[in-house]
Image (cartoon, helix red, strand yellow):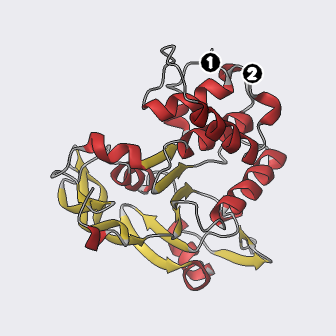
Amino acid sequence: MGDDTLMSDVLDLVDVSVVREGRALVDEVSWSVKEGERWVILGPNGAGKTTLLNLASSYLFPTSGTATVLGDRLGGVDVFELRPRIGMAGIALAEKLPRGQTVVETVLTAAYGMTAHWQEKYEDVDRDRALAFLDRLGMNDYLDRRFGTLSEGERKRTMIARAMMTDPELLLLDEPAAGLDLGGREDLVRRLGRLARDPYAPSMLMVTHHVEEIAPGFSHVLMIRQGKVLAAGPIETELTSRNLSRCFGLPLVVEQNGDRWTAQGLPLS
């Protein structure tokens, strides 16, 4: 465990750049996430959203600047002790999981820090946890279905249950609603909203391109364009038409409807 005095900051980036082949994927980013906050990372393709998530997951180190995750500075910590404290759900991990495993096995293997099923004898307590998370994500009817036969939405919900298994202090969601139809998206957003509003749930970072995918309960937004942060702070003050227009490079109008958001371009004159 890191220094307890830092534990109120789940993530702290100070002047962080990540350079690959002479190009800055993120460029002198300073950003801090406090315990219990739920952040949305918004921006166009190639803006650096996934790079930020990879820094937060400790799978990527800064080229310059300092990154501190859960009180431990990247570069000065054993990442294999840090990683079980971080839950991650995204397309990249889904592709690594065995398609022949059942939904329950897919979630259970997370408790043992592996993607494959090695005939471990699972503890009843782990199985109960797996079933509880799957129930919360509406997967009760699919427990014995093979992961490879699931729809995109069912797969996403299984991945989020899996990410929760290690009781993480930080939950990272990489485009959780990508590829879903309208019904699948709305179902997932509703479930993520329930999770986001749970005071016992971990701090959360979610990458998306679409304000429609922001679940109720998300408290903060970071907007990034071409590797630079354009805005970061409470969602009520920062998710504005002006900020979003700058972020995506065309005139956009943002509206809040109840606890959901929409954005659309202005009609061509």
Residue 37 in the image: x percent, y percent? 51, 71
Q: Is residue 87 left or right of residue 63?
A: right
Report the amino acid beneath label 2: Arg
Rate crowding at label 1 as few (under 14), some (14 to 19) or many (20 or more) other CA atoms within 10 Å: many
Residue 187: image x %, image y %?
79, 50
For the residue pair 74 and 122, the one nearer the viewer reads as 122
Cβ atoms under marks 2 and 1 closer than 8 Å: no
Q: Which mark is residue 43?
A: none
Judged from this view, the residue extending furthest toward the front is: 124
Residue at left 54%, top 50%? 173
Query: Which of disc 1 and disc 2 is earlier in sequence?
Result: 1
| Residue for point 36% across, 61% down | 227
Badge 1 amino acid: Gln
Q: Is the N terminus in the top left, top right, bottom left or bottom right quadrant?
A: bottom left
Q: Which residue is mark 2?
A: 145
Q: Residue at x 53, y 48 (%)?
A: 174
Which x, y percent locates residue 18? Answer: 25, 53
Count neighbours of disc 2 (C-alpha within 10 A) and say few if under 14, some if 14 to 19, many if 20 or more: some
* Left or right of residue 88: residue 153: right
The quadrant of the image that shows the C terminus is bottom right
> Who's the residue at 48% across and 43% down the image?
166
The residue that label 1 is drawn on is 101
Q: Position of residue 91 (x, y in %)?
A: 55, 37
Task: Count numbered badges in the picture.
Answer: 2
Give the Cα distance between marks 2 and 1. Answer: 8 Å
Q: Residue 31 occupies which quadrant of the picture?
A: bottom left
Residue 151 versus residue 28: which sits nearer the camera? 151
Q: Secondary structure at mark 1?
A: loop
- Looking at the image, is 93 positioned above or below residue 19? above
Q: Is residue 91 above or below residue 196?
A: above
